Image (cartoon, helix red, strand yellow):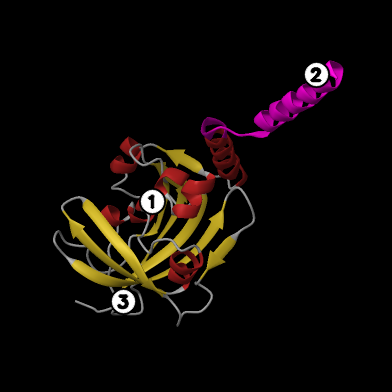
Amino acid sequence: MRIAISVVLSVLCLAAFVACDDYETYGEKKDKERDAINQFIADSAIVVINEAQFRSQDNTTNLARNEFVYLDNSGVYMQIVRRGCGTPLADGESTVLLVRFLEQCIQDTLAIYNDAQAFAPDYMSISRSGSTYSATFTSGRWYNTYASSYSSTATVPNGLLVPFPYINVGRPRSADEEIAKVRLIVPHSQGHTVASSYVYAYYYELTFERLIDL
């Protein structure tokens, strides 16, 4: 009887050990995320520059070199494709933007987008107070995916607000004017609920356009 009990306990201990061995710590998940970001950067032939170089280039990134600036405070990598027409969001201002985007999870094949149809953008309500930007999606693909499907929030994650100090938001008034466009690599700490839950990084391409011209 004692031998049988001993065998059972040994099996239970082994099972517990295997279960513990399969469990990933938060630190291990972050390491995997960092490795995935580095691999994405290498595969995409991205040249990473620091903020000092970014400022020396008048807050621009060289598209010919496929430059992305690494922003220390957020951990976001940003490429400004077009600064855009119009003016920056003013301190104390609130407005509504039309947003078209591609979102690709770097650690799996999941992607969502609304940039295939020009007539179906997402609507973003955004405000600025000093150096702080806050925004929510009020309708569109993002809202339907995250605010509805995941019973989550429509709040725009901080990582997607990073570009606003460096871009203009307006509406083209002539054929040679274009709206702002950026590309981002956003770590889980600056992403939406799904990103933070799974410790996944996401790649974005986004354009921003004012709903109402000033």
In magenta, the rendered stretch is 1-28
In the rendered view, tell whether residue 120 sits above or below residue 3: below
Q: Residue at x 28, y 79 (%)?
A: 173
Please state the horizontal and vertical placement of residue 88, each as a whole percent of the image.
Answer: 23, 61
Residue 126 is situated, as x and y percent measured from the top left of the image, at 27, 65
- Residue extending farthest to the top is 2
Relative image position of residue 32 (x, y in whole percent): 59, 36
Q: Secondary structure at mark 2?
A: helix
**Element marked by disc 3:** loop
Image check: 207 left or right of 46?
A: left
Residue 155 lies left or right of residue 90; in this view the side is right
Q: Residue 4: within the magenta?
A: yes
Report which residue position mark 1 lands on.
Answer: 159
Residue farthest front in this picture = 1
Q: Give 128 or 155, whichever is nearer the viewer.
A: 155
**Counting other residues with Cα less than 10 Å from the Cα at mark 2, is it few (<14), some (14-19), or many (20 or more)?**
few
Q: What residue is pinned by disc 2?
A: 6
Q: Earlier in the sequence, mark 1 or mark 3?
A: 1
Residue indicated by mark 3: 172
CA gap between label 2 and label 3 equals: 77 Å
Looking at the image, is 31 positioned above or below residue 95?
above
Distance from label 1 to label 3 (Cα)? Answer: 26 Å
